[in-house]
Amino acid sequence: MTANTIQPPVGPDTTAARLPRKRMSTMELYYRRFIRNRPAVVGVFIFFALVLFSIIGPLVAKYDHIYLDFLNLGTPPSSDHWFGTTASGNDLFAQVAIGTQRSLMIAVAVSVGTTVISAVVGTAAAYFGGIFERVTLLIIHFLLVVPTFLILALVSNSAGGDWRIIALVMIFTGWFFPARVIWTMALSLREREYVHAARYMGVPGMKIVLRHLLPNIGSLLVINFTLGIVSAVMAETGLSFIGFGVKIPDVSLGSLIGTGAGSVTSAPWTFYFPAAALTLLTVSMALVADGLRDALDPTSAAGGRA
């Protein structure tokens, strides 16, 4: 080596530059994309705040949601009744907390049920094809034109407003359209190389559906689940608002809004508090769904900022 040879500088910066970077996992990539969407993060905080309110609210409330305070009928918010009372003397704070809890339970149960059923039915129809696909699509297209709202109203009314029956009927009448969308998505996946390879290796059909097709439409299923919560809340609210949903002594946000709508001028707190809880719930889930869509979609603007 001659004296004129220039040696490259050696230091901690150059040493760190030579080290191979740690490969970012898929979940970490999705997480970074999601947290960069500030409205979506706000939506998560609002949603979990409502969940905590529905759990802790009934425990810290001074009165039970079915207790009638005949000395305070339709009174405004006070230190004794934080959200005021209804015309019957019920503590509105306890009722809003229980109503939020009930609406969340119905929404999550319905969203999980419809997502699972539509995912399995839609992907299975796309994979197996033939007579199974034709019969499945015939059933889906027939049920799509059935007035599901009337079925919900009739069954829930005959069941006495039991929220479990309402959730089951909403699952039964809510999986058709998502299954049709998932079937369309799965049609392109069944011709992929890894599906053909699994079939040639003798892997059973349902195992291919569950192990290869469903994971590759996972982003769509996550978004469908999130938006399904919003749809279920709105459907339950509509039923309860017109008197076909949850009934006394049980309460939901829809039944509270329906009751408070009649006294919105004389006792506005009976309407605005449950309406605010419903608005926060639907807006938060819409923000979360928007953030998940951007995080899971590789073509979104969030992908370049991760």
Image (cartoon, rainbow, N blue to C red):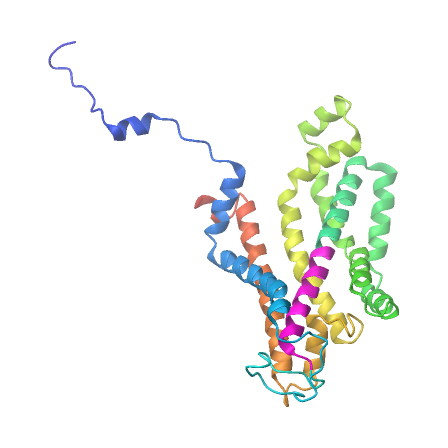
The chief SS type of the magenta part is: helix
Residue closest to the eye, 140 or 100: 100
Is 149 part of what is drawn in magenta? Answer: no
Which residue: 43% across, 31% down? Answer: 22
Q: Residue at x 73, y 76 (%)?
A: 66
Which residue is found at the position 60% from the left and 69% from the top? 60
- In the picture, the quarter occupied by the N terminus is top left
Q: Position of residue 303 (x, y in %)?
A: 48, 45
Q: Left or right? Give the position of 62 relative to 30.
A: right
> Residue lying farthest left?
3
Q: So how many labels did they put on this image?
A: 0
In the rendered structure, does residue 102 fall within the stretch colored magenta? yes
Q: In which image quadrant can residue 133 be found?
A: top right
Q: Is residue 296 above or below residue 248?
A: above
Of residues 192 and 162, which is closer to you in this image? 162
Residue 265, position as x, y percentages in the image: 63, 89
Residue 86 to residue 236: above or below: below
Residue 188 image position (x, y, % from top left): 69, 38
- Work out whether 152 lies above or below 134: below
Q: Quadrant of the C terminus?
A: top left
* Nearer to me, 182 or 68: 68
Q: Which residues are magenta?
A: 90-110
Percent coordinates x, y for residue 89 in the rendering: 69, 84
Q: Examine the image and state in which quarter residue 228 appears.
A: bottom right
